[in-house]
Image (cartoon, helix red, strand yellow):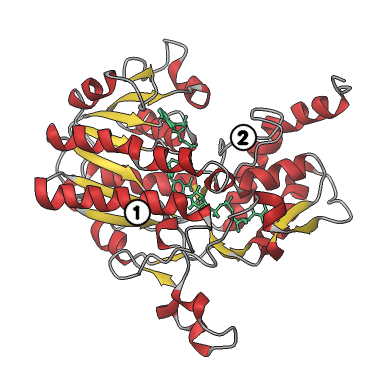
Amino acid sequence: MARVDLDGNVIKPMTICMIGAGGFIGSHLCEKLMSETLHTVLAVDVYSDKIKHLLEPDSLPWAGRIQFHRLNIKNDSRLEGLIKCSDLTINLAAICTPADYNTRPLDTIYSNFIDALPVVKYCSENNKRLIHFSTCEVYGKTIGSFLPKDSPLRQDPAYYILKEDTSPCIFGSVEKQRWSYACAKQLIERLIYAEGAENGLEFTIVRPFNWIGPRMDFIPGIDGPSEGVPRVLACFSNNLLRREPLKLVDGGESQRTFIYIKDAIEAVLLMIENPARASGHIFNVGNPNNEVTVRQLAEMMTQVYSKVSGEDAIETPTIDVSSKEFYGEGYDDSDKRIPDMTIINKQLGWNPKTSLWDLLESTLTYQHRTYAEAIKQAIAKPSAN
Ligand SMILES: NC(=O)c1ccc[n+]([C@@H]2O[C@H](COP(=O)([O-])OP(=O)(O)OC[C@H]3O[C@@H](n4cnc5c(N)ncnc54)[C@H](O)[C@@H]3O)[C@@H](O)[C@H]2O)c1
Ligand SMILES: O=C(O)[C@H]1O[C@H](OP(=O)(O)OP(=O)(O)OC[C@H]2O[C@@H](n3ccc(=O)[nH]c3=O)[C@H](O)[C@@H]2O)[C@H](O)[C@@H](O)[C@@H]1O
């Protein structure tokens, strides 16, 4: 049966130029587009490991509908041609691990602002639709975080719920280089919005709120650098796999809402296939029901990992570490992130489904199956010197 959009119209197969297709979100989006739709993907990235299973062998049912283009968008003249021959461009390419924001601020700003400029320009000049991936970090800190600790207003949602069209963007000082990423993302959002207003660019901006699941980042020393610091899911997975305590930065008091990648990808597919409802909008995509402190996340991951691995937790499951020690000078943090869901609900009728426990169970089952043996071997191997 033909796929229809939310208004009952038949969806015509389209060609999508997906930049950053080889990353965590890109790999899940490619999987979804291949298995459930007839769209074609021109997958652009410098890496392809996470989508290898979709590219080979030639006998896959979607062979011919996905093509990999290994290119760096910083300096490759083929980019404009790929955008020109697509109906839609999705830009996911970015440096997006907090450990980089204060230690590699120039790379972070270039990647999230300067390198995204040509993509916006080619879409605007060629009248092509753009779905750009921003971040919930553009909200920065909540208004409530500036109130006295014992203020009853801190309990009032007006002081912490993050709304696309009314919440301010509150960052720390320039010395706090953590905000280099959020600030670059905010400026590219403003530029895209202005291209829409002044030049008619058809755009959608996505603000993901901590999407997590299989294939997120890397496990240090296994499929990424030993000294590398990925995002929290991979940091904690690595600690659990190695039977080390999970490190709680500055007491693990910050709060996050985590959403299962597969729920979030459903929202992106709705945006792709319902341009009339998605264009001109900025969408929060998160799960407001899955809020925890980082300490609670560590405790839950420890319990879930015990269940899926069959191993008892270690005696001291967590340790405290200062942010200066863990991330270096210039780190700062978002205190709390709860997305308002009104706009995405109204435009696309979308809602997240998976509870935090369930998404951790499937994700940690994947981590255990994928990495436990490799970690055992790495630990058993005598060191090189
Ligand atoms: N995962 C989340 O929860 C989350 C949250 C907020 C925002 N985002 C945003 O979503 C996007 C994708 O995030 P992700 O989690 O999949 O990250 P990721 O690091 O797994 O994927 C990004 C991909 O972009 C590629 N890339 C980077 N620079 C490139 C360049 N110059 N040329 C070609 N390819 C390049 C990388 O190789 C990588 O495969 C990013 O823009 C990120 O800021 C993600
Ligand atoms: O995922 C998102 O929505 C956005 O937020 C992330 O930022 P953040 O949530 O701060 O990054 P994580 O690495 O996932 O850290 C979450 C929290 O855990 C803490 N943490 C991290 C790692 C660790 O080992 N221990 C620990 O306590 C951090 O200090 C932070 O408070 C990243 O900036 C982006 O990928 C993205 O734009």
Question: On the image, numbered disc 2 is attached to which residue?
Answer: 218
Whether residue 308 is visible to the viewer of this picture, yes or no, is yes
The disc at residue 234 is none
Whether label 1 lies within 8 Å of ligand 2 gets the answer no
| Picture quarter with ligand 1 | top left
Quadrant location of the N terminus in the rendered image: top left
Judged from the image, the secondary structure of the residue bearing numbered disc 1 is helix
Between the C-alphas of marks 2 and 1, the distance is 27 Å
- Give me the residue at 77% from left, 30% from top: 375
Question: On the image, numbered disc 1 is attached to which residue?
Answer: 186
- Label 2 or label 1, whichever comes before in sequence order: 1
Type of amino acid at the residue the image marks with label 1 = Gln
Other-residue count near label 2 (Cα within 10 Å), few / some / many at <14 / 14–19 / ≥20: many
Q: Is residue 44 left or right of residue 234?
A: left
Q: Position of residue 323 (x, y in %)?
A: 67, 57
Q: Position of residue 354 (x, y in %)?
A: 51, 54
Q: Position of residue 152 (x, y in %)?
A: 52, 89
Q: Nearer the viewer, residue 315 or 123?
A: 123
Q: Is residue 304 left or right of residue 79?
A: right
Judged from the image, the secondary structure of the residue bearing numbered disc 2 is loop
Figure check: 199 above or below 344: above
Type of amino acid at the residue the image marks with label 2 = Phe
- Give me the residue at 47% from left, 55% from top: 179
Figure check: 196 above or below 40: below
Quadrant location of the C terminus in the rendered image: top right
Q: Position of residue 231 (x, y in %)?
A: 59, 46
Q: Which label sits in the foreground, 2 or 1?
A: 1
Q: Quadrant for residue 60, please give it.
A: top left
Whether residue 7 is visible to the viewer of this picture, yes or no, is no
